Image (cartoon, coloured by chain):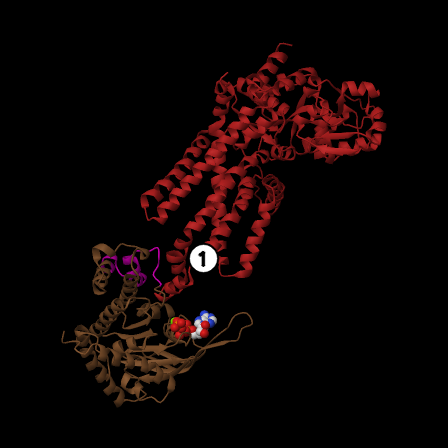
Amino acid sequence: MNLFADPRWSEALGHLPDYLGNHVRVSVTALALGLAVSLPLAIAARNRRVLRGALLGLASIVQTVPGLALLALFYPLLLALAAVSLSWFGFGFSAFGFLPAVLALALYSMLPVLRNTITGLQGVDAAILEAAQGVGMTPLQSLFTVELPLALPVMMAGIRTAAVWVIGTATLSTPIGQTSLGNYIFAGLQTQNWVFVLFGCLSAAVLALTVDQLLALIENGLRNRSRMRATFGGAGIAVLVAATLVPAMTRSQTTYIIGAKTFAEQYVLSALMAQRLRAAGLSASSREGLGSNVIFGALAANDIDVYVDYSGTLWANQFQRSDIRPRQEVLNELKTMLAKQNITLLGELGFENAYALVMPRKRAEQLGIRSIADLAPHAAGMSMAADYEFFSRPEWAGLKKAYGLSFRAQRQMQPDFMYAAAASGEVDVIAGYTSDGLIAKYDLVVLADPRHAIPPYDAMVLLAPRRAGDAALRAALQPLLGKIDIAVMREANLRAAGNDATSSPDAVAKWLWEKIGTK
Amino acid sequence: MALPRAGGRKRLAGGSRLADCSAIAVSLAENPRRMPTSSLISYAHVGKTFDGGRGANRVVAVDDVSLDVAEGEFLAVVGGSGSGKTTLLRLANRLIDADEGHITVEGEDVRNVDPIGLRRRIGYVFQSGGLFPHLSVAGNIGITPKLLGWPADEIAARVDELVDLVRLDRAQHRDRLPHELSGGQRQRVGVARALAAKPRIVLMDEPFGALDPLTRDALGDDYRELHRRLGLTTVMITHDMTEAMLLADRIAIMRGGRLLAQGTPAELSDSSDAYVGELLRTPRRQAERLGALLPRDGAA
Ligand SMILES: Nc1ncnc2c1ncn2[C@@H]1O[C@H](COP(=O)(O)OP(=O)(O)OP(=O)(O)O)[C@@H](O)[C@H]1O
Ligand SMILES: [Mg+2]
């Protein structure tokens, strides 16, 4: 079969205007901001040793922070700033998506620009500087007519490095709500869609190379005093930016934005909701791959309109509750707590996606383990794996306390690889998700929780404050409530984990709708 | 005056110069030591000390120098490496500021004038050339007029005039970058740049160094002629006593930051200072040797 006959290529291509446009916008803005800050700083620092050292040191430290962490750090920072600005100056701003991404990426771009500008300016021959002074230039004239032109090649090398870094790192801005080419990569990794992953990587690389070459053209033009080449390069960048602005301009403003966290079930459910909205004649777009701490804040701040969260997650994370309550009580209490933030709990979908301890069926039967209580005596000799959040979540603390659990080793893993790791015996127990289709696929078993240490995790639809009274939205989503049981969701999730054309979130969502619509 | 006779052309140029020279010698004799009106540059007990850098001793680059340069005069400053010649020159257009003493240019204490304006009024030829590598010959020559805000067509006309004046070829050289020129051509551009804004004063720091003797001779003669024709006041640094004697009206001799002696070649040859005597011995010996080797020079 021809690799490119796969319909997922055309699906990927369909997202390109949106993803690429956003990617270019955020990268170019960040780069422009980074340059606007670093160039004057570098110029100011070139003759000041202390400032120079401090700046370069600071920029190097920023560089050592992984891109993903830097982006993630800006979200809470801006959230706090937005709150302060709202209470002091009466206006808030969105800490979601564009702004934190631009700030983090701009910061990230500063090191190569600072370093190369300072190096380039210092590399100008002292005799030339004296000549500039001697012919009667003011320091500013010397800077602009002599020093900067002579330092230009070194400076441009730095700017090009910064551009390539920013474009590459911008793929990591997806989890803080900035749509980018990273959407392909995050979605592809979560839903085992390697076509998407490849497409995302390739398009980011092509974009980086294109911008790099355009900058090289500008540099070449400036250096050889060829106005044509410089104009050509500049025009290329301008066209790139303009082209990406068009889709943003034409996008309608009434779009409902549906959020999704970074796992397959969420992609499927957001696709399902989008399909329902469109079927009801509403325009909908998704903001996928959001970090689970980012998404709730985004909803509360009206940056997204609707998404699916789980009662236990909100209970423990958003409201910091560690007490275990019966299911209905949790739901009722959540409803009132959410209402205080003007968030509407529209209703439950009908299944739970709880954390659960999961192990291979055969091994469990051999050892006679059916519940977590049975597991506890064996735990000291076993290793356990979970996703990146689990071990720092209150549920884990609750489990350990309730059952006296203590494993020989704890590992963190990409959720999709966890199940295979358990099946192959690489780890003994995993903290899986009850709605995950891979449990059946790998012949794993969910251990019972007789002491109710794990809170209930009902999937439920939340609406943003500004959509509280939106009857059309409610009506469009109403048919989903209470209709999706655990068996259907597991099968849907299993389908989404497949690696072919029928496994795209959209296709699975269609399948899911047929399944529940006919019930 | 025991000047070597290098050739017919030189003798002609030399002749006109000798006339100027004696005229100044006369004026010098008339107002010895003080010439408040006719002295264009004057140093009075000037001192300049440099920080030697990490832990090193301080360097006294210029030490209690008093020197007057009359209007229209061509003064050569001679001295060994590190004797403070460049420092002395840089003090005049405030590339550096004196620690002690006073320097007046065109009757004004340089400390009271705007250094930028001062530098635009004074032509300066740098020891290392100091051409801007990213600017064409025309761009380099026209830089000071441009800074002074001359209209573009006037600058272009002035550049053409100067390219001719320093005997470069308009069509060939005007738009080249400095690295596309020979060393001698670069030095011509340096001189042209110094003259571009029509200064009354030109300071030249070894302008003809690192050139073959023929080019050097020709450039020197050319400049001497310009100096005369344009009525310039020139201070030129050189290592080469012969060059100094051939071109300048008066010579100042520096050693270890101090001004050892000054005067016309004839006055200097009367000096009792051993170092001055030694400096003068070289050209004299050269002249004698050449006289012996080329007995019928000039008749050929
Ligand atoms: N910026 C400076 N900092 C420290 N010392 C300096 C500086 N400029 C000059 N000097 C010192 O001052 C002394 C005189 O230097 P200057 O450049 O005036 O010598 P010069 O006579 O022009 O020598 P040369 O013939 O080699 O060009 C030297 O010892 C030199 O090292
Ligand atoms: Mg010198």
Q: Secondary structure at mark 1?
A: loop
Q: The C terminus of chain A appears in which quarter of the rendering?
A: top right
- Is residue A233 rendered to the left or right of residue A396? left
- The residue sitting at 59% across, 36% down in the picture is A176
Q: Quadrant of residue B270?
A: bottom left
Q: Nearer the viewer, residue A176 or A60?
A: A60
**Residue A217, image x, y percentages:** 38, 42
Colour assignment, chain B: brown
Which stretch is magenta?
Answer: B130-155
**Residue A465, image x, y percentages:** 61, 31
- The residue sitting at 54% across, 73% down in the picture is B56
Q: Quadrant of ligand 1?
A: bottom left
**Which residue is identified by label 1?**
A123
Question: Is B7 contained in the magenta span?
Answer: no
**Residue A242, image x, y percentages:** 41, 36
Residue at the top extreme, as displayed: A518
Q: Nearer the viewer, residue A32 or A480?
A: A32
| Chain that appears red | A
Give above or below for A466 relative to B299.
above
Amino acid at dot 1? Gly
